[in-house]
Structure formats: structure tokens, C-alpha cells
Amino acid sequence: MPKDKIIAFIDFFYPPFRRFMPEQTFRYAVCGGTNTVLGLAIYFISYQYVLHKANLDLGFFAFKPHIAALFISFCINFVVGFLLMKFVVFVDSNLRGRIQLFRYFLSFSFNLVLNYVLLKLFVEVLFMPVLISQFITTCIVVTVSYLSQKHFSFKVKPDGD
């Protein structure tokens, strides 16, 4: 099964980190890091080559290119992230899959709004470069995301609940 191979591959690199963090945190760091790098790559490619740094005009609304690239990236990251969190990181969660998906969607949506607000602040108010702004924003969002995934989306219910 592919998930077993992914888990075995990640766990192969875990021993040197055993003293510093639990296995689940290490798996989250690897999966989240991989998904983050994927998101940044999609963001960059979307911003530079798909949108050509131009507004995305939908007819009824025009997105600025840095915001359109953010939404493109997040659409792909949502699917990849949920699958990695459910099947690789938080495998002990005893919540039903649809509850996990709904909670993940809520958490993901909150993180998307947080990312949007921070990106607008850094780019449009503080006039920081787009890619640096996205990098700083990503660091903040990753921290919030880990806490919400662990304690909300994929929590383990005590027996009897």
C-alpha cells in the first residue's frame, strides 16, 4: 500500500530526531514541509508562468496575481494535505473520515483566510516583496495549522465519547 511505503520512508529518517520530538510531530514536519514546498512551488509557477503576474479577471471580479496564485496553490494543497494528515500523520484519530474532512476544511479555510490577510498586509500595506511575504506568511500559517490539526481536525476522542 502506498501509505505504508510513505510512512516507512519517513520513519527511516526519524531515529536522529527521536530525542527532540515525538514520531507524530516528525511525520507532520515532513508531510507538512513537503506539502508546503509543493504549495510554494505551485504558488511560484502560478504567479510567474500561469498568471504572468497579471490580474485574473473572472468577469465579475478580478483577483490580483498574488492572491489568485494563493488560491490556486491552496486548492491543490487542500487535497494533498488532507490525505497526508489522515493517512500518514494522524493515523490514531478515531473520528469518522467525513468529520475529519469537514474539520480539516474548517481549519484549512481559517488558514486560507489567515494567509490571505497576512499576504495582503505584507504586500499591499507594508510593500514587502511577494515571495518573501508568502514565505513569512507560510511560517505563521504552518504553526497555526499544526495546532488545529492535532487538537481539532484529527484529535483522538477519549473512549466513550
Image: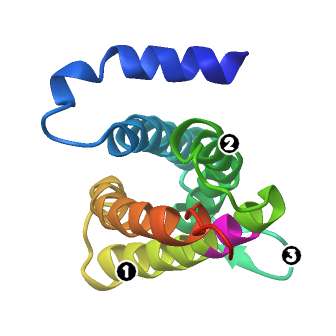
Q: Which amino acid is tagged 1?
A: Glu
- Badge 1 density bin: few <14, some 14–19, many ≥20, Cα 10 Å: few
Look at 36% across and 14% down and name the residue there.
12
Tell me the SS state at disc 1: helix
- The answer, for residue 117, to whether it is visible in the render is yes
Q: Is residue 142 above or below residue 1?
A: below
Sequence-first disc among 3 and 2: 3
User: Within the image, what quadrant is residue 156 found in?
Assistant: bottom right
User: Within the image, what quadrant is residue 139 found in?
Assistant: bottom left
Look at 41% across and 36% down and name the residue there.
27
Q: Which residues are magenta?
A: 102-106
Q: CA distance from mark 1 to mark 2?
A: 33 Å
Sequence-first disc among 1 and 2: 2
Left or right relative to 111: residue 136 = left
Q: Is residue 102 above or below residue 80?
A: below
Considering the image in quadrants, where does the N terminus appear? top right
User: Within the image, what quadrant is residue 17 found in?
Assistant: top left
The one nearer the camera, 94 or 111, is 94
- Badge 3 density bin: few <14, some 14–19, many ≥20, Cα 10 Å: few
The one nearer the camera, 139 or 61, is 139
Q: Which amino acid is tagged 2?
A: Leu
Left or right relative to 1: residue 59 = right
Q: Which mark is residue 59?
A: 3
Q: Which mark is residue 83?
A: 2
Q: Which mark is residue 124?
A: 1
